[in-house]
Image (tube, grey):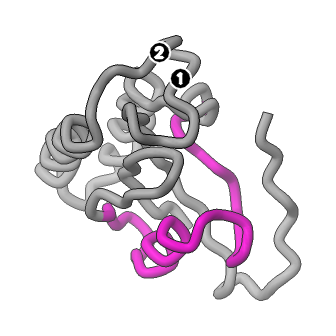
C-alpha cells in the first residue's frame, strides 16, 4: 500500500487531510477496491462528490463533520485510505500531486475543499491538522 513519509519540516509546513477519491473512465487507473472497472465519467464523479460536499457543509464546523466524512470515505472512496476513513496521515509539499497539495495547504483545519481533479480522479478533501 501507499506509505506516507515521516515529515521532516516544521508543523506549519505539514498538513493532515481526509479525502474521498472518485475515479472515472479518464483517470490513470480506472479500477479500485470498490469496483474492478470504473464506468462513470469525470463529470459524474465530480457531481457525486459535490453532493457529498453539500451534505458535509450542512453539518458546519461541528466535530461530527469529521465523523461523517470518515464514514462517507469508508463507503464511497476509491482510495485504499478508505479503510482509514480517508486519512492520508501527515504530509509535506512534494509528496502528492501539486493540485491536491495546493488545495490541502490552502484549507484551514476543519475546512472542506471544492472538488479537486488529479490524474487519479476527483477528490473531496477535509483538512484535519
Q: Give the image location of residue 91, x and y in percent.
A: 71, 66
Q: So how many labels did they put on this image?
A: 2
Q: Is residue 13 left or right of residue 123?
A: right
Task: Kindly identify which residue carries mark 2.
Answer: 37
* Dot 2 and dot 1 residues touching (CB under 8 Å): yes
Instruction: Calculate the distance from the C-alpha at mark 2 to the C-alpha at mark 1.
Output: 5 Å
Does the segment drawn in magenta span residue 106? Answer: yes
What SS does tag 2 mark? loop
Task: Kindly identify which residue carries mark 1.
Answer: 31
Q: Which span is picked out in magenta?
A: 84-113
Q: Is residue 101 left or right of residue 107?
A: right
Does the segment drawn in magenta span residue 128? Answer: no
Q: Is residue 74 left or right of residue 92?
A: left
What SS does tag 1 mark? loop
State whether residue 120 is above or below residue 96. above
- Pick the residue in front: 26 or 56: 26
Amino acid at each position: 500500500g501507499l506509505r506516507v513519509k515521516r515529515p521532516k519540516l516544521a508543523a506549519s509546513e505539514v498538513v493532515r487531510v481526509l479525502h474521498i477519491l472518485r475515479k472515472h473512465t479518464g483517470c490513470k487507473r480506472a479500477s479500485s477496491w470498490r469496483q474492478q472497472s470504473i464506468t462513470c465519467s469525470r463529470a459524474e464523479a465530480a457531481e457525486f462528490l459535490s453532493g457529498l460536499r453539500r451534505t458535509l457543509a450542512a453539518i458546519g464546523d461541528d466535530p461530527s463533520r469529521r465523523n461523517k466524512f470518515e464514514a462517507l470515505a469508508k463507503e464511497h472512496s476509491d482510495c485504499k485510505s478508505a479503510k482509514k476513513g480517508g486519512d492520508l496521515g501527515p504530509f509535506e509539499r512534494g509528496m502528492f500531486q501539486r493540485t491536491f497539495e495546493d488545495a490541502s495547504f490552502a484549507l484551514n483545519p476543519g475546512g472542506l475543499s471544492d472538488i479537486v481533479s488529479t490524474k487519479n480522479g476527483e477528490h473531496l478533501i477535509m483538512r484535519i491538522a
